[in-house]
Amino acid sequence: MMTQKKLDKTAIKYNKTKDPKYKDQWYKLVEKTYGSNTIKRRIVSVSKCHKRDDGTYLIIGQSELL
């Protein structure tokens, strides 16, 4: 497991040089250390017709549409 110090050193190198290889290396180290943060998302439609009287929006889930 990577240490936070190694991640910090890579970020500092990128900030000093602005070399894209350090940026890519940092992202790879973060993913290797903490895992991928990508999740599958679905789009939820929000329009004026779903606006409540108090100004908030009503979110309609997929199961409620069926």
Image (cartoon, helix red, strand yellow):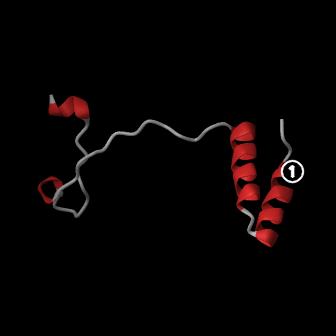
Residue at 40% across, 39% down: 41
**Left of 30 or right of it: where is 47?**
left
Residue 12, placed above or below residue 65: below
Q: Which residue is drawn at 82% across and 56% down?
A: 10
Residue at image point 78% right, 60% down: 11
**Dot 1 surroundings within 10 Å: few (below 14), some, or many (20 or more)?**
few
The residue lying toward the viewer, choosing from 60 and 23, is 23
Residue 17 pos. (x, y %): 79, 70
Q: Quadrant of the N terminus?
A: top right
x, y percent for residue 12: 82, 64
Image position of 34 with respect to 55: above or below: above
Toward the left, the furthest residue is 49
Q: Which amino acid does label 1 sit on?
A: Lys
Residue at the spot 15% in from the left edge and 59% down from the top edge = 48
Q: In this view, does 15 lie above or below 31?
A: below
Q: Is residue 17 above or below residue 11?
A: below
Residue 40 is drawn in which quadrant? top left
Q: In which image quadrant can residue 66 be found?
A: top left
Name the foreground residue: 49 vs 17. Answer: 17
Question: Which sits in the foreground, 13 or 36?
Answer: 13
- Give the quarter of the image for residue 47: bottom left
Q: What element carries label 1?
A: helix
**Mark 1 — residue?**
6
> x, y percentage for residue 3?
86, 44
In the picture as drawn, the residue positioned furthest to the bottom comes out as 16
Query: In the drawing, does residue 52 fall left or right of residue 29?
Result: left
Residue 24, how many percent across, how many down? 70, 52
Q: Tag count in the figure?
A: 1
